Image (spheres, rainbow, N blue to C red):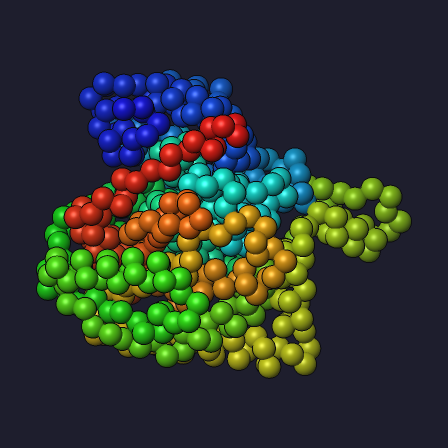
Amino acid sequence: MELFSLTVHATRDLLRTKQVSPKEVTESLIRRIERIDSAIHGYLSFDGERALKEAEEADVSLPLGGVPIAIKDVISVQGHPCGCASKILQGYVAPYDASVIRKLRAAGAIPFGRANMDEFAMGSSTENSAFGPTHNPWDIERTPGGSSGGSAAIVAADEALAALGSDTGGSIRQPAALCGCVGLKPTYGRVSRYGLVAFASSLDQIGPLTKDVEDAAIIMKLISGVDRADSTSLDAPVPDYTANLEKGIKGLTLGLPKEYFVEGLDPQVEQAIRTAVAHFESLGANIVEISLPHTEYALSAYYIIAPAEASANLARFDGVRYGYRADGITGLLDHYGKTREEGFGQEVKRRIILGTYALSSGYYDAYYLNAQKVRTLIRRDFEEAFAEVDAILCPTSPTSAFKLGERTGDPLKMYLADIFTLAANMAGICGISIPCGLANVEGSKLPIGLQILGKALDEGMVLRVANAYEKSTKWHLARPELGNAEKAA
């Protein structure tokens, strides 16, 4: 078996027993990237020479000693580019490590490469990258999802052992579903956001994309915990998420929200989810129907709150101190206007305008304040549900991967790709997507994702439930054939 195809825990075992070296693992990944990434375009950049040097110095006795981890281009790694897939951050190099990177380095991991993404994490297809879209390795004519599409695609294509992404409205879970890998969105505040370039500060969370649930549990343990550099991080004990993975789910009560099985849900996706639910019953879980009545308002509220926060956060990008600067300017206001007009992409500008409007005088109460009230109702829905159930089962995405270009002309249709994921961000709870089937679409086999939601700080439960399903099925072992990608490369 090729080293690039291994899981993190399998690689770690080989490194600890000195059956392979960190350099050999890193070289295997570099060869894989050089072979196929010109077709996938999952990486914006990677410094192979630097990674090999770090591999030679790695301490394999550490928890992730010598294991390369890919990083989404929105997370700061000292000395690496951090462009958020945007022209406006052209040439910017991060002067410090994000807190999650410091923690990974302390565990011996090697930050490896910059994964492509939707610009400033705004999108559901990775088509908003200023440097071109990422292609789904299951069918290179289709999107990998977004905004962490690059991270999901390189994990699915075995161009990375694992990757970090960020999730503001589904940006880890949705691409994980469309690419057939595992994607974990932690509870808001469980993982420090220090060093994550902000999109919507009350919604953003960093989390892992991996090849199996055990890898997600390992990385989650290492990146979690309170951080004095992030006032929103939670001072709560961090358990060993691997400790209860094998506990099973017999006797647990799992909820099935009726609002997630609605018109617009692809029949193949619904069938796969209902088959997975029946499998959970066979494992001893009790399945009950629940209601999350304010779900229908989540999309509208999200697209007021998130753009409003983005409008404020992105005001700092003005071309004065770093990044892109427009030519031919005639004064300060002209400089701001031209630099931001030329530096930001269409979707980012759309959300800045939406957010600025929602926060403007005369509209704040009508839009932003009401959206926050809806958010409170959504959170209460989940609180009431979790008083009755241990976890919630539902689809991650209403469809399998759609074609590149299919939704770019219709923003609302694109936004609906996150209809099943963004409520978890609004409520601040945790969730995971795991593979649960393959759809047959126009001759292509495309992954389907099952979403498992848990109450705040209950990542251990969603990982336990996910692991029980994964260990008793084989969907996580499915891999794209990559025939068309290799031909294209």
Pick the residue in front: 435 or 338.
435
User: What is the residue that sits farthest to the right in this orientation?
Assistant: 330
What x and y, as percent, mark residue 290? 27, 75
The quadrant of the image that shows the N terminus is: top left
For the point 67% across and 71% down, which residue is it? 357
Would residue 392 be found to the left or right of residue 185 on screen?
left
- Above or below residue 67? Residue 262 is below
**Going 60% across and 41% down the picture, which residue do you hit?**
132
Does residue 410 lie above or below 363 as drawn?
Answer: above
x%, y% of residue 413?
A: 54, 63
Residue at 36%, 19% in the rendered image: 23
Residue situated in front as seen by the camera: 309 or 95: 309
In percent of width and height, residue 167 lies at 44, 54
The image position of residue 406, as x and y in percent, is: 57, 54
Marks counted in the figure total 0
Viewer-proximal residue, 124 or 400?
400
| Among the 4 quarters of the image, the one containing residue 479 | top left
Residue 268, picture quadrant: bottom left
